[in-house]
Amino acid sequence: MTPTLTPTAPLTALDRCDRCGAQAYVRVTLTAGGELLFCGHHFREHEARLRPLASDVLDETGKLTDPAPLAEHEA
Ligand SMILES: [Zn+2]
């Protein structure tokens, strides 16, 4: 058995949704080859159709709900 290591590079701000151009939070790797990038909104919209075609789904939508406690300044 030779495990195939698929490099899962994290998505960056440069990755854009294929549908609307917003920042991509999901990368879908297709079994047929190729990749698709989606924002959280469009991934949810197409998820049901994409799942059967995908060999791998990198879902980073969790980052969207991360609270950014940067504005909390209590002095
Ligand atoms: Zn989108």
Image (cartoon, helix red, strand yellow):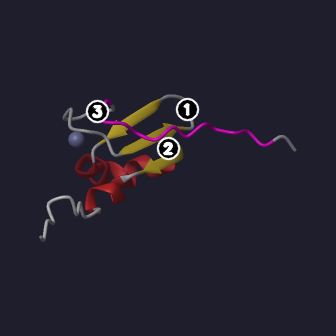
Circle 1: residue type:
Ala
Nearer mark to the viewer, of 2 and 3: 3
Is there CB contact under 8 Å for labels 3 and 1? no
**Quarter of the rendering containing residue 12:** top left
Vertical order, 62 against 53 (above or below): below
Name the residue that disc number 2 marks: 53
- Whereabouts is ligand 1, in terms of quadrant? top left
- Residue 60 location in percent, x, y? 39, 52
Alpha carbon distance from label 3 to label 1:
21 Å
- Residue at point 39% right, 49% down? 49
Main secondary structure found in the magenta portion: loop
Q: Nearer the viewer, residue 71 or 3?
A: 71
- Mark 2 → mark 3, Cα distance in angstroms: 20 Å
Marks 1 and 2 sit apart, C-alpha to C-alpha, by 8 Å
Residue displayed at 42% across by 41% down: 27
The part of the chain drawn in magenta is 3-14
Count neighbours of disc 3 (C-alpha within 10 A) and say few if under 14, some if 14 to 19, many if 20 or more. many
First in sequence: mark 3 vs mark 1? 3
